[in-house]
Image (cartoon, grey):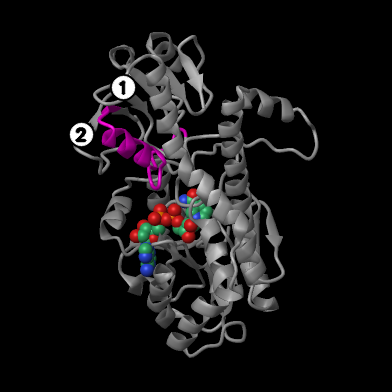
Amino acid sequence: MAAGKLVVLGQGYVGLPLAMRATEAGYDVVGFDVDKDRVERLCAGDSFIEDIASDRLAAALATARYHPSADVSACEGFDVAVITVPTPLREGLPDVSYIEEACELLGPYLTRDCCVVLESTTYPGTTTEVVAPILERHSGFMAGADFRLGYSPERIDPGNTIWQFQNTPKLVSGVDAASLVAVREFYETVVDNVVEVAGTAECELAKLVENTFRHVNIALANELAMVADELGIDIWESIRAASTKPHGFMPFYPGPGVGGHCIPVDPSFLSWRVRRRLGYAFRFVEIANDVNDHMPDYVVRRLSLAFNKRALALNGARVLVLGLAYKANSGDARQSPAVPVIEHLLELGVVVRLADPHVGPAPLDDRVTRVEATVEEARAADGVLLLTDHDAFDLAAIASEARYLLDTRHRASGPTVEHL
Ligand SMILES: NC(=O)c1ccc[n+]([C@@H]2O[C@H](COP(=O)([O-])OP(=O)(O)OC[C@H]3O[C@@H](n4cnc5c(N)ncnc54)[C@H](O)[C@@H]3O)[C@@H](O)[C@H]2O)c1
């Protein structure tokens, strides 16, 4: 069993799974979060992260080695601290203020030879240019010489039941050789496979390469979908056909746009850094943003054209929208393309009925009525719009009753179904 005191700063989608796994591995873990409500819920054994079942949280609490806390003094005496706080975009610019705040809070608790790791997704250079100076200022120690410092991006894919925290290879890096060893040795105790990266900037960039790759390829699939539709070609069939090539091809699929806190955000960290440092545009990211951001509009346009063909106007029509979350079987609606789609529908005078069994109460326009995805709802609607392909939707039953269904995920079939 691993031993020592670990502090995880931030108990969200990334921090909580790490805290659980480290508790199971034998560490004494402080789950520090500035959100007191979150901490209270955690102390009560109530998990708000879908990948962490409440009984797993309860088991961690029962070991008496997992301590959720909103009191920063609980960090005292740590051996390893991992920072997993948010890194959003604010008006299109990277906001690393949560990282700065976490470092300000942690700095006074550094001791000689402790190890600090940044996991938040960020632009290359953050570990040495933002994290190190704040920790050094508060502690009087030098990163590398007096304490270990590194970067290790999280690759968690919420809802993925195959690739989870423990079996997903973990990239590790350090500001010097000793830091790399310390970071690697820590992660070797909690994950199955650790991969060393030569420097923290390379490691920070690796995470952005992964998500930019996805962002750009989704944009390519979206652009192909729009072009293929105009050419009267079924893009889904073409992608299925291309996917049979056993080498050099990886399928990506069209959809109503990108959402969540990674794909729409992370590539812009890279383009911001390129523009700031080098003075020119990172064109792939800008084109991909442009295409993906346009998709909610395109979906509404397709719906409107379909209604037009049936001699119906969207104004006053009743539309059952299936899905608010940004991805299937998730309750996460952050940056979901469903939000702009619904806004556009409301602007056009559509009576929006929205079904999403995974997303709890959400700040939506009062004109949106939350309903269950029943066959009766489908029958009563002038049209159905599938935005998120939750397994909980009985699409066969809904498709058989819908007068018209625009399926942006290629999951339904039937005479009244049209795909993106
Ligand atoms: N969610 C994912 O799927 C995912 C995957 C890979 C990487 N990431 C990255 O990991 C980071 C964290 O993302 P997340 O989804 O876990 O965010 P989250 O919002 O779910 O959780 C972050 C937590 O940090 C807390 N926090 C904010 N400031 C703090 C501070 N100063 N000290 C302690 N806690 C603080 C917040 O209260 C919140 O509970 C981001 O950089 C994100 O881009 C997320």
Q: Would you name the residue on which mark 1 appears?
A: 313
Q: Would you name the residue on which mark 2 appears?
A: 367
- Asked if 251 appears above or below 378 in the picture, the reply is below
Q: Amino acid at mark 2?
A: Arg
Which-is-in-front pick, marks 2 and 1?
Answer: 1
- Spatial CA distance of label 2 from label 1 is 18 Å
Q: Which quadrant of the rendered structure holds the N terminus?
A: bottom right
Considering the numbered disc 1 on the image, is that residue within a helix, a strand or a loop?
loop
Is residue 132 visible in this depiction of the protein?
Answer: yes
Q: Position of residue 395 (x, y in %)?
A: 44, 17
Looking at the image, which residue is at 52% across and 51% down? 289
Looking at the image, which residue is at 61% across and 82% down? 144
Q: Are marks 2 and 1 in contact (CB under 8 Å)?
A: no
Which residues are drawn in magenta? 328-353
Q: Position of residue 273 (x, y in %)?
A: 56, 69
The count of marks equals 2
